Amino acid sequence: MKITAEQSELICSLNDIFKTSDEISTILDIPKSAIIKHLKNLKRKLITTKNFYNVQIKHDYFSCIDSPEKAYLLGVLASDGNISANMIRLRIHPKDIEMIHFMAKEINYLKEPRINKTSYGTLEAGLSIRSTLMKEDLFKLGFSHNKTYSDLFIPLSEELTRFYLLGLFDGDGSVFYTMVTTRTEHRFGETREKYRFSYTGNTITGTKIGDYLKTKGLDLKMYPLKKNPKICSLQVSRN
């Protein structure tokens, strides 16, 4: 069957709004085989029930880090994400599921995020994306299949670095305070609040974060873990 110019325009417009070949065939009353052949000739992505959600994802989202949102999510993935083959995954505690919803909205991930039980019996919220382009872009930025000991202080513009660090901190950081009682002679027995924030990650990244924050007038102490000096805690405490 020969597809006319008018039919071609209609097929392409329906393909653009993610209609499957079956749906286009029904709407335009054109054989499905003719539609598939025409779209392949045009080198267009065929929409099927299996790839319906995947083709709508912004696969080039990390091709250019040019917004606070992208920098923040890059930090979140650097801390709580992982890459296996062409699969990018983000898994977090369900209480932080708004982070999953935020990323889903940003990359146009239309599936409802899932909450699963881990092998340890705990619950986790997860989002998985199969994307060769996204994986390649993340690798260009410094990610790897095993990022445990990788340098994750990714060089970004001065304006975007703070958003990247915020993403890292939301994944691997903590803030807390405790009540302490003074035991020294001076102000003995006085009770006050003591605040601390810290980042725990590999020592390479921790060192670079510490050096960067020193340029901002913030001096954090770094404590390598005794059992594994390749991992450190970068922290600051104040009364």
Image (spheres, rainbow, N blue to C red):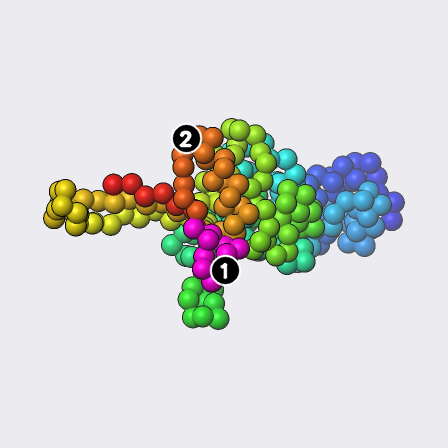
Number of the label disc, if any, that sits on residue 228:
1
Q: Is residue 33 left or right of residue 229?
A: right
Q: Position of residue 166 (x, y in %)?
A: 45, 40
* Residue 71 rendering spot, x and y as whole percentages: 54, 38
Which of 14 and 211 lies nearest the eye of the viewer? 211
What's the magenta region?
A: 223-233
List x then y, in percent, for residue 179: 20, 49
Q: Residues within 10 Å of mark 2 (few under 14, many from 20)?
A: few
Q: Is residue 169 above or below residue 115?
A: above
User: Visible in this render: residue 106?
Assistant: no
At 43% from the left edge and 51% from the top edge, which residue is drawn?
223
Quadrant where the C terminus sits is: top left
Q: CA distance from mark 2 to mark 1?
A: 29 Å
Q: Which residue is mark 2?
A: 217
Residue at the spot 64% in from the left edge and 56% down from the top edge? 145
Residue 35 visible (yes or no): yes
At label 1, which amino acid type do we have? Asn
